[in-house]
Amino acid sequence: MATYTPTLDERLLDRLRGAVRGTVVEPGDPVYDEARKVYNAMHDRRPAIVVRAVDAGDVMATVDFAREQGVPLAVRGGSHSVPGYGTCDGGVVLDLGLMRGIRVDPDTRTAWVEGGCTWADVNHATHAFGLATTGGIVSTTGVGGLTTGGGLGHLARRCGLACDNLVSADLVTADGSFMTCTDEQHEDLMWAVRGGGGNFGVVTSFAYRLHPIADILGGPTFFPLDADVIRRYRELVAEADERLGAVFVVGLGPPVPFLPERWHGRPVCGMVTCWSGPPDEDDRIRERVAALGPVLGRYLERMPYPVINTLFDDLVPAGLYHYWKGSFTQSLPDGVVDTLVEYGASTPSIQSVTVIFPIDGACHRVGPEETAFSYRDADYAIALSPTLTTREDCEAQKDWVRAFHRGLEPHSLEGGYVNFMDADDQDRVRANYRTNYDRLRDLKRRYDPGNLFRLNHNIAP
């Protein structure tokens, strides 16, 4: 079916072409089909133009154009938005992918990171100084979407969420203004950017607090899918040193050399260890993880911190078909454990990994109203993600993930993590922000009354 494309005002378009140092890509250009691609192949959309920005000036000009033209504006960083918010039909895609500069100050332990960077970029730059900060579990994820949604990752128990480590953000608002936001300057927007999603503008640069973390003990340990394993994991997290990152996964055994072939494609569960404490405690950590259940296979070694952020990359390359749901829970009650086992046994593909992120420790030392991310009483965030190699197969598995999510609901908090929401979760936006929603809506009315930034989990003005 043909997609309707509005007629763009040539005067405005000529002005945009003259204003940007980057590239304005239009239908018919040789690179158009490549420029419109996003990570989740479910979204095959045809924007009127794609602006490949190279600096904040390009961003300001593009925001002005979209507002004056009256067309949808999609902002793309790493392009991992599962609902496809990094693209649109008939509108403007603002692609930040060329804005990948980073500067690290080892004395102040701060990194200034442009909005198109991925976590691979950040980890590489900071590791040279023996420093790191919380950032995702897939290295190709963009810093922008992860941070503005909150920012879960391997270091969250020790260092807090990515948004908790944000000390400054350069933001282009809906009227094209450029603002540097800190806790002392435009502090209302700084508060909103820490978990409020892309509702308030385009972040062209982030400044992160860094931590002295270089090498870690990291990697997965796999067990049979069994409720007792998950209960022992729950006990481990409740008592563990905050330097122990302990992401848990439920799915089908991947075809990796350290897992016996007979377990490939069979239901398993596993813990991805990220121990950032001293090496002389590595053996104790290995023993404690192994005590969760019968070990089917493991790769648990000393490695540079950036390596652990790449372990899932080959499993979920760009171009697969995704559909997600998410929940927050307190203490992984038995009802959640039983549901994980029940639906984990029917996981539809090796790429369809259910991921449980601990968000205790340092995450709990920030109050629910100190940032827009309000679920400081949650202990875990759960991501349900059927991922398939064809559109038809992904569509067929939507009922599986919806039933999985319904099974978790009686044992979960009302809302969920915005970065785990799909496009049909707009009715959950208020619950996702809880008591912070009204304040966020007031800020939205002030800074974006026309709702230019609406391709997101939208807080309508």
Image (cartoon, rainbow, N blue to C red):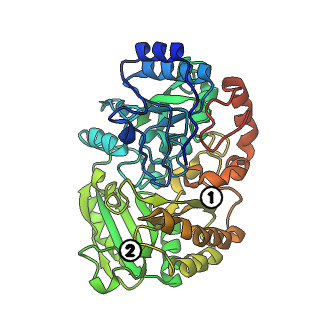
Instruction: List x then y, in percent, for residue 340.
Output: 56, 75
Q: Do the residues labelled 2 and 1 touch (CB within 8 Å)?
A: no
Q: In this view, does 453 lie to the left or right of 443?
A: left
Nearer-the-camera pick, 126 or 196: 196
Q: Regarding mark 2 in the picture, which secondary structure is present there? A: helix
Viewer can see residue 379: no
The residue that appears at 36% across and 41% down in the rendered structure is: 34
Quadrant position of the C terminus in the picture: top right
- Labels 2 and 1: the sequence-earlier one: 2
Label 2 crowd (10 A; few <14 / some 14-19 / many >=20) = many
Kind of residue at disc 2: Val
- Residue 397 or residue 105, whichever sits in front: 397
Check residue 378 in the rendering and tell me which mark sits there, or answer none: 1
Amino acid type indicated by mark 1: Ala
Image point 71% across, 41% down: which residue? 436
Say the numbered circle drawn on residue 289: 2
Q: Is residue 290 above or below residue 167?
A: below
Measured as percent of width and height from the top left, residue 268 is found at 42, 79
